[in-house]
Image (cartoon, grey):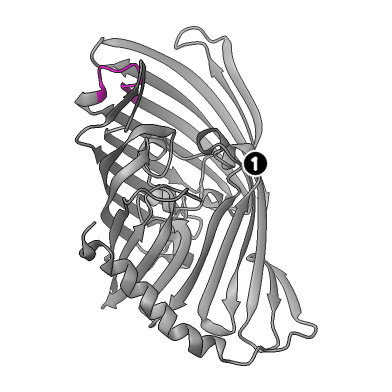
């Protein structure tokens, strides 16, 4: 590995280490009888130093779904009743307002990725952040990579029970490494640049094989910031009084990836390189929200094999379009979504190389914004094997209920 690959990570770590002695040398404050508050942001314990504070949040999401036998056979082929998500989250500032910590744990089976990792993968986030300037922040630890928008939107802020199939196949999710974020305003407009150098192997990885992942995301908000960070919240719950727009693009290069999706998926039989490109846009005004997302993954040699068993990088491209309208003077929000996924030619001859089209209609009822809500969607999925010109399809009804603080 060339020396230049180590420079971004080394520079950030050295900067943090140089500042650490100054931070740790400060006397530890006392914490007698800290004030405790409970509001829309969870339970917060405030230290008497006026700086230290720790915020605790939890949420539970229940999901029920049923899928038909086929497009014309409406008998039930599969049902699922599950606690989809049960998470605990801790975040706050320690000793210095520039030092922040974030930890998130997951306890539901569908959240722990045990089938792919072989162990209960409880830890989701664990990172510390130092605010170097009002415009620049750096983090070290395990966190979401700056990839596609729908992944960066917390699952607690979704308007449907789960994300789109485009996200499921092409997202880069979480990784362990060093992260930088820079934001600035020019007049009314605002831009954000994010970057990360990470292991490339996802949450809680084993010892690396010499490969790393390099991810960057560039965002432009020409009409200024969204209300309450609404560019990373699905639906226009803030009912933006003026037009808001966010345009973004980025890529993630993963060298010697060991899993089919880089940071996600089953283990490959041999390491593979892959590059994933992202582009997305978000529009909001007066309760109307429109989100468009494009993903494209390439790999020069996506297929790996062990005997007759084949595992491959899911190379190809996908588009997701999602629109919703929070009804006037109401907490009801109907939603439409269209997703399409096309596999790369190199994997179209495989049994898993199917193209997908999914059309969904849904509705959400917000009781306490995204903290307490019920939602549901009814969608039709159509799969087509491009090489064999063979198609199949089914219908799914999925309902969700979420409670949290």
Q: Nearer the viewer, residue 313 or 376?
A: 313
Q: Which residue appears at 46% of the width and 16% of the height? A: 394
Q: Is residue 142 left or right of residue 8?
A: right
Q: What is the magenta range?
A: 347-356
- Is residue 33 visible in the rendered image? The answer is yes
Q: Which residue appears at 39% of the width and 50% of the height? A: 208
Q: Is residue 304 above or below residue 233?
A: above
Rendering quarter of residue 7: bottom left
Q: Position of residue 96 (x, y in %)?
A: 55, 85
Q: Which residue appears at 30% of the width and 44% of the height? A: 256
Residue named by callout 1: 108
Q: Nearer the viewer, residue 365 or 155?
A: 155
Q: Is residue 142 left or right of residue 78?
A: left
Q: Is residue 251 left or right of residue 148?
A: left
Circle 1 sits in a helix, a strand or a loop, which is it?
Answer: loop
| The stretch drawn in magenta includes residue 166 | no
Q: Is residue 375 above or below residue 75?
A: below
- Is residue 224 visible in the rendered image? The answer is no
Q: What is the chief secondary structure element of the magenta stretch?
A: loop
Q: Residues within 10 Å of mark 1 (few under 14, many from 20)?
A: some
């Amino acid at each position: 590995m060339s020396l230049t690959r180590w420079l971004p990570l080394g520079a950030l770590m050295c900067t943090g280490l140089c500042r650490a002695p100054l931070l740790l040398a400060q006397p530890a404050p006392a914490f007698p009888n800290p004030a405790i508050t409970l509001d829309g942001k969870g339970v917060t314990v405030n230290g008497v130093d006026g700086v230290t504070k720790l915020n605790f949040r939890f949420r539970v999401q229940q999901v029920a779904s049923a899928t038909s036998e086929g497009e014309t056979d409406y008998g039930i082929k599969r049902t699922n009743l599950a606690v989809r998500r049960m998470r605990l989250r801790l975040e706050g500032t320690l000793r210095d307002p520039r030092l922040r910590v974030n930890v998130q744990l997951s306890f539901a089976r569908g959240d722990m990725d045990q089938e792919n990792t072989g162990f209960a993968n409880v830890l989701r986030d664990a990172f510390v952040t130092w605010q170097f300037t009002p415009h620049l922040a750096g983090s070290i630890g395990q966190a979401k990579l700056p990839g596609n928008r729908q992944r960066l939107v917390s699952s607690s802020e979704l308007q449907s029970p789960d994300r789109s199939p485009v996200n499921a196949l092409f997202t880069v999710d979480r990784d362990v490494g060093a992260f930088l974020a820079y934001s600035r305003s020019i007049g009314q407009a605002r831009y954000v640049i994010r970057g990360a150098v990470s292991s490339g192997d996802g949450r809680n990885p084993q010892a690396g094989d010499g490969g790393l992942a390099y991810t960057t995301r560039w965002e432009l908000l020409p009409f200024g910031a969204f209300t309450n960070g609404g560019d990373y919240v699905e639906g226009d719950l803030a009912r933006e009084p003026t037009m808001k727009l966010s345009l973004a693009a980025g890529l993630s290069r993963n060298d010697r990836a060991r899993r089919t999706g880089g940071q996600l998926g089953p283990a490959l039989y041999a390491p593979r390189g892959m590059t994933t490109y992202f582009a997305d846009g978000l529009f909001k005004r007066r309760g109307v929200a429109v989100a468009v997302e494009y993903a494209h993954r390439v790999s020069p040699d996506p297929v790996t094999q062990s005997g007759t068993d084949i595992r491959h990088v899911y190379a190809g491209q996908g588009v997701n379009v999602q629109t919703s309208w929070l009804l006037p003077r109401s907490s009801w929000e109907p939603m439409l979504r269209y997703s399409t996924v096309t596999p790369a030619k190199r994997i179209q001859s495989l049994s898993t190389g199917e193209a997908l089209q999914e059309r969904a209609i849904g509705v959400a009822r917000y009781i306490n914004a995204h903290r307490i809500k019920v939602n549901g969607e009814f969608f039709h999925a159509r799969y087509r094997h491009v090489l064999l010109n063979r198609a199949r399809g089914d219908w799914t009804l999925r309902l969700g209920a979420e409670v949290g603080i």
